[in-house]
Structure formats: C-alpha cells, structure tokens
Image (cartoon, helix red, strand yellow):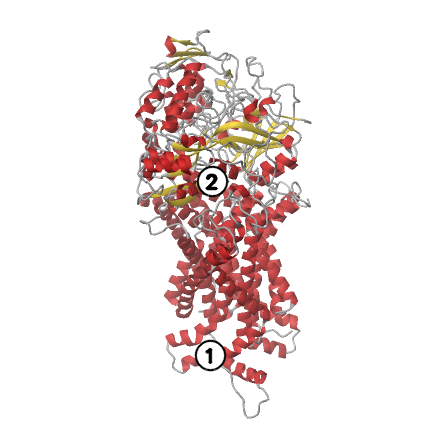
Amino acid sequence: MSVGADLVLESEATVESVELVPDEVTARSPFQLFWRRFRSDRVAMASAIFIIVLIVVAIAAPLIVSVLGLPGPNVNNTNALDIFGSPSGPSVSHPFGVDELGRDVLSRTIYGARVSLVVGIFGTLIAAVVGTIVGLLSGFYRGWTDTLMMRTVDVFLSFPVLVLGLGIGAACGVRGCLSGLIQPGIATVIFIIALLSFTYIARIVRGQVLSLREKEFVEAARSLGASNTRILFREILPNLIAPLIVYSSLLIPTNILLEAALSFLGVGIRPPTASWGQMIADATPTFNTAWWYMVFPGAALLLTVLAFNLMGDGLLDALNPRGTRS
Amino acid sequence: MTAYIIRRVLWGILLLFLVSLLTFLFFYIFPAANPAQLRAGRNASPAIIAYITKELGLNKPVYTQFFDYMKGIVLHFNFGYSYYSGASVIGLIGNRLPATLSLTVGAVLLWLLMGIPVGVISAVRRRSAVDRTAMGTALLFVSMPVYWLGLIVLFLFASDIGKFPILPGASSYVGLTVSPTKWFTSLLLPWFVLAATEAAIYSRLLRGSLIEVMGEDYIRTARAKGLPERRVVWHHGVRSAITPVITVLGLDIGALLGGAVLVETVFDIPGIGRLNYDAILHSDIPIVQGTVLLAAMFIVVANIVVDIAYAYLDPRVRYS
Amino acid sequence: MRTFARSAVIAVAAVVLAVAAAACGSSSSSSGSATATIPLKAGENPSSEVLYGKKSGGTLTAYSSIDFEHLDPGQTYFALDYIVVPNITQRPLFTYPPNSTTQLVPDLATEIPTIANGGITDGGKTVTVHIQPNVRFSPPVNRAVTSADVAYGIERGANPNVANPYFAGYFGSASPSPLEGAESAKYAGGPIPGIQTPNSTTIVFHMTKPGSTTLINALSLATSSPVPESFAGPLDKHSPTTYGSQYLVATGPYMIQANNTTGQFAGIGYQTGKSLTLVRNPNWSASTYTSAYRPPAYLNQINVKIGGDATVAGLQVLKGSDSVQLDGATHTNVKLAYQSYPAQMTITPGVGTWYAALDNAHGVFTNVNLRKAFWAQLDRAAIVKVTGGPLVGEPMTHFIYPGNAGFLQAGGYPGPQVDYNKDVNGNHTVACKYMKLAGYPSCTYTGSQTVQVVGGTNGDFPAWTQVVNSGLQALGFHTHVSLVDQSVLYAKYCGVPKQEIDVCPNVGWIRDFADPLSILYVPFYGPAIVPTNNSNWGQVNIPQVNSAMEQAALVVDPAARAQAWANVDKLLVDYAVAAPEYFSNQPELMSSDVAGVNDQWNQGSWDFAFTSLKNP
C-alpha cells in the first residue's frame, strides 16, 4: 500500500470501527483492517475454510479412507466391472463408483487431492517467485536488464508447450534424461508447469512495475533520498502484492488444469498414482456412459478451482476496499 | 514510434532464429525416436538404417544440419521435407493453416465478447448475485478439460450423434471458399468450446484489474466532473484496466495459432495442431521445426501488436 | 509390430460359446475355469457373410482416426494400409477371399502353384507362377502388366529407398529359404538371378532351399503386386521413393484419385492427415480373374476421412448412413452396439495375439523359473475384462492363435496343460512353486534389480499395464512403470534391445500370411534380433527353438508342417518365452444401410471390393 493510501485507509477505517466506548478510541493496524474486511466476505471465508479442509484431507488421506472403510486407491478389482468390462456406478460399497480397473473412485478422489494441491501450489509458488524477480528487475531497471530478461522470456513463450511436454515425455519417459536428472513424474510436471507460467507473471509484473515506477509516491521517495533497492522493496513490491495474489489465485487452478492437460499428452503423473487430472483423462473415453468416473473428480476439481478463485477475490477486495461504487 | 516498431521487428527476426535453434537442440538432446529407424520399418538391417541416416543428412554434426536448414529457408524459402513421407513442409503447413486460422480468430472474438462484459459487470457489481453467478459459470467452464467439454458438446448438440441435434458435428469442417455457410456452422461448436474454456481467465483478469483501477484518483475526478457512470467505467476504467488482458491475449493467440491440438482432434478439424503432434512423436523434425517457427512468428507478431497497443493506451510507457 | 491379420473361420462352437452369464452385476466365474461368455447376435459373426448378388453404385464414407503410412505396395505394412492396397488398388499374385483365412486363391495369378500342376518343382526349390494376360495398369501407364513388372515389384523391396519390411525375412538374407542371389545382406535392389521371366506371363522363382510353402504364402503379401519399372524406376532413386508418396499406378478395381496424365495422387486423391479418395480404375476388367476369386466392386467411390476421435466416429457411423469405421470399435461403442445396434457390428474372432514380452537376455527374466512364476501369477482373465470382455478376446494360452494351422495341435483354447498355464485367472500357489525353484523360498523377489515396465498410453493399454504391474508386485518385484505413445514404445524402447526393458506388456502379433511360420518366426527366432526396429521384443534366442524353426520352415506337407510348428509352439511354452495375455477379436462398425463384408484374413476389416450399399 502506498503511503497516501494508508492515510486514507486509516481514516476511513477509524470511522468504521469507532465504538461508543468512552475514552477509548483505538486505531487498527492495516492487517487487522484487512482481516476484518476479509472476514466479512462470507463467500471468501467459506472458500478459505474449504481449502483448509482440502489440505487436511490431502494430508490425512490414508486415515480418512480407512475410516470410511474403502479399499485403497490402487486396489484393482475386475469383479466390479460388468461383462463388457465397463465400470459399475455408485453403490453402497463404492459411493462414487469404480473406474476402468475396478478401483474405488472415492478413494482415488481423496488421494488425488494430494497431487493436485502439490502440483498447483508448488508449481505456482515457483512460477510466482521466479516471475516476480524477473518482472521486477526488468521493469524497474529498464535498459539492458529489461531487454535481456524480456527477450529470454519471449523465447520461452514462443517455444510451444506441446513440443516441450511431448518431447520430454517421449524422450525421458522411461529412464529420465541428462543422466537421470529429469525423471518423469511429479517433479517434471511441476518443473514444466513453473516453466510455462513464470513467463505470464513476469510479463504482468513488469507491466505493473512500468506503471508504478512513474507514480508520485516513488518520485517522492526518490526525492527523499531512497536507494533503488529500498524503492523496489518498500514502495513497489508492496503494490505488487495485490495483482500477484489475484494472478496467483488464478494460476493455481490453471496449473492444476495444466497437469490434467499434461496427463492427456502422456507426460503426467506416473501411474498408478491417483491425480484428478489423470482420472479425468482416463475417464474421457467413456464420457457418455460412466458418468461418475468423470463427474466426481471433475467436481472436486471445480470446487477447488472455485474456492481458490473466490478466496483470491476476497483477498483482493479486502486489500482494495475503495473501488467501484454502485 | 517508428523506431520502436523497427526495433521490435528486428528483435522478432532474431527471436525466430533463436527459437529455431532451440528446437533443433531440444530434439538433439531429447530425441523422441530416431527418424531414420522409424522410416526404415520392421527388422531393417543396420545397413539400410545407415543409408537412410545418410540420405536424411542425420550423420552430419548438428551445427552443419542447422546451418543447411537455415540456408534453405533464407535462400530458397524451403522449409525442408518430412523425414517420414517426403512431403514438403511448406506444402503441408499451407494446407492446414486456413483451418487453424479460422478456428483461432473465431474463438478469440467469441471469448472476448463473452469475457469482457462478464469481467466488467463482475467488477462493477462486486459481490452481488450477478457477480457470483457470472464468475461461477465462467469458472465452471474453465475447470473442464477442453477435450472433455468437446465430447460433451458433441454428444449433446451434434446434428448426427447428439441428443439435441442442432449444429454440425465432428468431421464437418469445410474451407471458407468451399461453402461459407457450412464453414461457419461447422465451427460454432469448436469456437464455443475453445472460448468457454478461456473466457473465464479473461473475465477474471479484467475484473481484478478493473477493481484496482476504479480505485484510482482520476476515476474519482471523472465522477466528480459529472460524467455518466457508464462512461467512467468504460472509457476511463476499462481503457486502463485492459492492459494485462491484452498482454495475455497476445500470448494466447500466438499459442493457439500454433495449433489447438485437442480441439482439432475432437472435432476432426484439419489444422496445424494435429500435424505438429504426430510429427513430434515421429521425430519428424522438419515438420516440427516448421510448425514451431510458424507459431513463434505469430507470437512475435502478436507481441509487437500488444506492445504497440500498450504504448498507445499508456503514454507514459511509450517514450521510455 | 502389427502387420495385417487374418481371422479364422473356426468351428462355430469356438465362437458362440456357452450361454452367457447374466448381464451387469454378475462377473467372471470362479477360479479354475474360463471366463464368462457372451453369445454373438445375428449377423455379428462374419463367417456367414454373403459375397455376391448385391447392388451396385453409391459412395461409401469410411472413418479412420489414424493416417495411412505406406500406399506403395512395396512398403505396405500397417493394418490400415492393408485395407486399401492389396486387392483394392493393387493386385498381388495370390490372396484370400473375404470369408476365409486359410484358403489361398489367385488374384493376379491364374492358379495356385502345386506339385500336381507343375508349379512346384525341384523338390520345392523352384516355383513357377503364371499371371493373367490382360490386366492393365491405370493411367498414365495404361499398358498390360507383364511378369517383369511383378519381378520389379519384388526386387525393389531391397532398395533402401523402398525398404520393404518383409524382404529380408521372406526373400532375402534373413529368410530360411532365400531367393537365389538375394541371400547376402549386401544385396540392395536390382535384378535377382533367382527371379526369372521366360515370357511376359510367367515368373519362375529359384531358391537355395526347398521353401516353396513359405514362398507361395509370402507371395500373398502386397509386395508381389506389379510395379512398372519405366514409371517407378526414376522415382525409386529418391530417398524415400516418391512412388507411393507422390505418384502411383493401380491394377486393382479402384485407384486413388489422381492426375491421370502424371499419375500424381498426393494433394489430389490423398491429403495427408485429412482424406483419401478411391475412385474406379478405368482400366480394370472384372473378367481378368479366375472363378475362385472375383471382386464385384459394387461401390463407385470410397471417401476415407482421416483424423478425429475414434469413439465419436463410431457413434457417427452407428447413427448415420452410408459409412463404416476403419478403426476397431472402441470399448464403449462395443457395448453400445451390442446392446442397441447389434446388426451393425461384426466381431471377427482370432485376429491376433497380445502378450507381455519378457526380456530373456538381461535382467530378472533371464531366469526361466521367474518367467514361469510370472506367467502363473498373471491374471489373464482380468486383462480380457478391462479391454472389453469376452466379446473382444479370449485368454491366450500359447502362441499360435485361433484360425491358423497348428492352433489345435498346439492345444487349442485351453493350451498346453502345464501347471503355470492352466489357470487363466492367475494362480499364486503355482507361482510360488516357481519362485522357490528360482531361489526365492519366501515367494517374494528379494533381489535388488528393478523391473522396467514400458506400456502404451493409447486406448486400454494403461489399464492392462496396471494388471501386469499388479502381477509383478504380487511376487515382490520392484517395478518402474512408464507409459509412452505407441509409436515411441516400439521405435525407442521395446524395439531396441540395448534399452533392456524388462517387461513390455502391450505387444502383440498378427501373422503376415496363413502359415504358422509367419506367427512364430520373426518374434521368437534368435537370429532375427536386430539392434533397432527389432520385433523379437523378448530377445528370445534358444538354440533348440531356433533349429526347430529352421526345420519346420522347410516342411512341405501341410499336415506335417502344422504339427511341426505346433511343436515349436509347445517349446515356446516350455521355455515360457513371454507371458501370454489374450487372443483378440476385432469388432467393426457399419451404418444400418451398409451391407458390409469383412476380410477375415485381414483383422476383419471392411473389404471395399465386396462391400455395398443396401440402397445405392
């Protein structure tokens, strides 16, 4: 937040939060104000709670599956298939039905949360960190730094996903490449996802920095003798938090979906590990008959995507209370 | 401004060269399979494979191969021939490009038409029922894998296999010059599928960006001047807020023009995507190089357009 | 590698098996017996197909999700290419009628050479073939076909620009009975002394050993189709040859639509990845055939649409009109067609085998007892189930598949009754017995080697790779499972001995022609191992097996030959060279107004020269 905005914020907040307690007028810190506003957005709070529950479910998956009395996620059971080898639908013993190998879909959906969350969160985290550094440096310093970094980003962006994904999948599919450095599986997926998404963040951060560096408060700080580093970290970076959060909250579900797309191309998580993306890819050939196989991991994916987005919206609103007036 | 454009164009050419080099090296380091072996067929003797390797020039060092390739492009505009079938790369790509162009342009227009109003409304009426519903629907679509959405759409609406047969289904694409009506109707379902899965991203981007912009001082000033709210929002707010949208749009168009392989497969549209996909698996490097260069060229052009638009919209950027 | 296949008209009992178990809910039967069965509905078994007396005219649409690879008869190899090349656009010397898998009939030739008619002489070392005198090439060549054209068609296979995948194995250096002059691996095209053309309608083949049976069968391959040297010779100097990729002439009832002055079809009748158009060959005459085989060529035109999703295309065929699908029906469409469109699906039995290749030369499976243990442990019935159930296959019990000579002698459906083969559901007790023999008394592998498993990403491959993986893990093996695209699977991993892949669960074999040699020779003969594009995926090299094959290859009497190859099959079972999975059936789909005829010798695929429309 800029200095000027802080002042305005506090004065507004003070007006909102004065209670009629005599002799006691307390000012609240920006964080407390932010939290209050976030808390008042019920939808955002519900989303945040959902995400926390999801993380808990992911961590405690084995416990939950055994408590529910379900078979493990990798237990094949061809007896649950009909005579045509088609999976059977929801039943008492399999609340979410079974997949093409007779494995319990509910069990796999619960375990699938692990992969999706790990891939989504870590992939985005790495992309955000790298992208911010690149965008910040190039937008602020301009000149050769900017040119070099942005041109490198350009080359990355122009290099097609398909070639990268398929090429690595085909070439490194079995024993890895570069003497085992690139092994197929979750690490490669995160690597590819971070590689593809950092460029978006870098470009957007750069654009934001380009605008921000011309603003009055930066000039003001400079005229007060602040060094470049100080301006970068104290003035510009804080103003990037909001768009970063918006874009990251958008990026997490996008990256979870990217993992699904990579599964389609055969570069995904190593089987038989359950991942929502892999499950949806496997369910696609039976799209018109075995609806449960697609719907339940799809619903899990959708709810996760919704939750991250709504929470991100709530965060943005809480950070940015001024804005449109109806 | 002219100098700016010229600089960007020159960089674009250098970029194409770098991308081409990177692709070459990539396949050298990560070969999917040996193209000579693939061509040679079952139980080929080492002698035959060696012969084919020599004919394809694969026994030369990688920098010689790359140099020959570049020479062919620059001097003769010859992008080489498929290792597998011997067909000319330019011919193959030229044959498939119109379909990809048709698919991309229509989808982009549609998702902008869908995404921008939703983004604006959601920003203006924050936290309202309209906002939540619109965003929820948009997010529903973005969560669906594009291949699955394509299949569902065909299964529901395709005139030959759908439950409610209203639009032409898979394999119905014809070129614009063959029959404009058929061309248009056969692309409606693919356009919708592509647009639906992208629109949400744009509406969310715009929403976030617009919310921030609408908090700016000059918006307050515009309101204080007595301008109607709609003008404030669209002419002042959206104009500034659209910049990240345009950034991402440029990248997405470029990528799509490299071929939307999943949509092309589901709807059996003979575009560049499928050509590229099969070529990668066959290590048919001339075709891959050709399509990669094509996609990169589109991205370069799109980026130049975006940068110019950026400079136009935000004068402070222009002259630095 | 799958080439083309021919299915069998086997005893009806083998196809319409015992009454089916009840529908959904009831699953495979208890251990020890075969899996449950499903009776075919009327019209689904192509053995009763009617060939003649249909209506002429009309245009057929055919859907294929994959593209053609080689339209040149000298290179034709994959199943899809076999649908349009032999009998349709090109005329090999011999062929099989649609409703047979074993009965060789003359196509371009006038009769099948036998000892009685003087076609086989010199103790089986010389074969003489006479061709029809008035067969003409399509434009622009137009002239009559001569024996020199047939000779050139075969000889050019050794030219590296053509690289015929069968040449070495059946005519050249890797053949048990090569043509004279082509025995050396150095031979690379040009006239072969062993092929002589005394007059314009006679070809004489000379071999160094008595391999007449193999040779006559091998001449049913597309490569014995005539190719005009004056037209194709210059094209064959390009690498790869442009005959078949840019230019082509036809001798069959149909041709790929082309420029009739230059013969160029690329870009006209064939658009890579998009479409193939077959039109009538103006120079074709129905009278240039013997009565044994005479294609009626009812259709006027066939439009093949390439690309798209196979399940969607299947639905379009089932619900539409005037169309067929060239891909085998996908898993969901088989069930749908059986339940709702039974008259529109045919299921051809005995199309080929699917098995898990085990690396006999490196890693854990060099130990024959471990191979037997895995064979015993593997749940073959589960694999049948996850790929579509009894409609699409039967558990495999030995290596010659139904419909081929030697199948019954080698044990038929139940197969050799060795203990590790008896239970198609997998038998852990028996597996433990062999684990103990292998030196693991706890019935668990305790060694340190990892088992590399490479399967495919296409279709049902991932599911049945998981069944194989479960079998391996149940015996304590540490597995490392990877899935790659099918073309990469063969070209880069399973087909390259140096990669030392321990288990390739998704490999299979379809015969090249109706002789058990073409089923067992290439995949299991030691000297057939090559460093790349290898088809002996398990690198099987057992001296006893090799010599048995060499001897069986030279047997002429059909009954003795069948028994000789059945004995080879039994040896392969005794050495547990690979882990069998299932004998496959091929389901094919057509629209309701199409009177489709299946080539049972070619995987049950649609025969364009016999298929017609009900209302053209």
Disc 1/disc 2 C-alpha distance (Å) = 64 Å
Type of the residue with mark 1? Phe
Give the letter of the chain under mark 2.
C
Q: Is residue C495 left or right of residue C383?
A: left
Q: Which residue is mark 1?
A: A217
User: Along the line of sight, which residue is nearer the eye, C260 or C82?
Assistant: C82
Q: Position of residue B10 (x, y in %)?
A: 42, 56
Image quarter (top left, top right, bottom left or bottom right) of the N terminus of chain C:
top left
Disc number placed over residue C464 in the picture, else none: 2
Residue at left offset 55%, top offset 13%: C290
Q: Are marks 1 and 2 on the same chain?
A: no
Give the letter of the chain under mark 1.
A
Circle 1 SS class: helix
Does the rendering let one see residue C566? yes
User: Along the line of sight, which residue is nearer the eye, C217 or C464?
Assistant: C464
A277 relative to C367, above or below: below
A254 relative to C478, above or below: below
Label 1 or label 2, whichever lies nearer to me, is 2
Instruction: Please tell me how crowded label 2 is: few (under 14), some (14-19), or many (20+) other residues with Cα within 10 Å.
Output: many
Q: Position of residue C357 (x, y in %)?
A: 39, 35
Does the rendering let one see residue B78? no
B23 relative to C348, above or below: below
Circle 2 SS class: helix
Quarter residue C431 falls in = top left
Type of the residue with mark 2? Trp
